Image: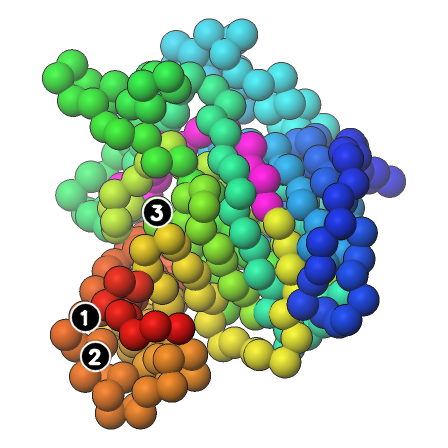
Amino acid sequence: MRRAFLAAGFVICVSTSIGATALRAQDHTVLATSSTVEWGHYAANAKPAITVHSGDTVTMQTLSTCGPTDRLIERGVKAEDIPAYNEEVYKNYPGKDKGPGGHILTGPVAIAEAEPGDVLKVEILKIHLDTNFACNGFGLHRGFLPMEYPYSRSRIIPLDREKMIAHFAPGIDIPLHPFFGSMGVAPGQGRVDSAPPFAHAGNMDNKELVAGTTLYIPVAAKGALFLAGDGHAGQGNGEVDITAMETFLTGTFRFTVIKGKPLLWPRAETPTHYITMGFSPDLTEATQHALRDMIDFLVEEKHMSRDDAYMLSSVAVDLDITQLVDGNVGVHAMLPKDIFTAAK
């Protein structure tokens, strides 16, 4: 039987949006072990690694997608630089439970009050880089240009965590912006591949979702069953070779259940922007999803007419390609907050 490996922290008092009675919010930690991860899927019947309450904060330790420890050592990474839990998970996770995707995701975290039709508000409070390296690579028949690269190649990218720079190559340094490529909840039934993002969020690869931002996800299963992983030290929009600067991250999240305001698609909020998202095998359809949800947002939250919302989207909203390589492509619509100058 798989059992969670958890640590509890101090207790604070907060109010949540699930009722008039304030709950005692707690801090929890979920360490990455073979008993506290799901390999390659989001599943409605997954056993929670931990059950928390709306308003609680959970720190989650995650693996990278760089592969097993022995392979990393073969590629030149020092053994002492690889988190010990990486080998334990690869060694002990049941093979029969793997798939259909390849991401190793920590959780799930069940939020006791979450029911289908609710929205899970996920505040990304902190993201910590757990190693001094990242990996990037492409493989045969993968990526956005598979016919032009009919072979595989990978590289290890050193990370300077003090200066927050990746040394991609001599004379090429990239600023680090750590974020989780995959954050999502369970589908309403069954299990879904961890690779394609959709209404459950999942493998969005949205580089805007750094520490200090908030993600809103439609809940489809009891408890929501939140998972996180696929850590990135940084990424370009598109993620064209199918990987970013893949690395090990620990994230701290605050979960709040929102009742009575259902969503069709995930949304997000940064200190500077409102974000809507769309996912589909077709880029045009994904863009339409993101745009329609932005119009809905402007109508619902900014009390605009649909005509005005459509026009504002044309003159002020940026439609960016999130990623092009995960089965369902992603588009996110970016609406700047500072255009709204009226006093609240």
Task: Say which label, 3 or 1, has the lower sequence index.
Answer: 3
Q: Which mark is residue 316?
A: 1
Q: Position of residue 254 (x, y in %)?
A: 62, 49
Residue of label 3: 207
Query: How far is disc 2 from disc 1 in space, using C-alphas?
Result: 6 Å
Query: How far is disc 2 from disc 3 in space, using C-alphas?
Result: 24 Å
Q: 321 left or right of 98?
A: left
Q: Quadrant of the C terminus?
A: bottom left
Q: Main secondary structure of the magenta part?
A: loop
Q: Is residue 329 visible?
A: no
Residue of label 2: 312
Element under label 2? helix
Task: Say which label, 2 or 3, has the lower sequence index.
Answer: 3
- Which residue is at a point 42% across and 79% down the rendered structure image? 301
Q: Is residue 324 visible?
A: yes
Q: Which residues are magenta?
A: 241-253
Query: How far is disc 3 from disc 1 in space, using C-alphas?
Result: 20 Å
Q: Position of residue 91 (x, y in %)?
A: 67, 25
Depth check: give the residue in front, 307 or 105.
Answer: 307
Q: Amino acid at mark 3?
A: Lys
* Image quadrant assignment for residue 4: top right
**Is there a contact, CB below 8 Å, between mark 2 and mark 1?**
yes
* Image quadrant assignment for residue 107: top right
Q: Amino acid at mark 2?
A: Leu
- Which residue is at a point 47% across and 66% down the rendered structure image? 266
Q: 249 left or right of 245?
A: right
Mark 1, residues whose alpha carbon is within 10 Å: few (<14), some, or many (≥20)? few
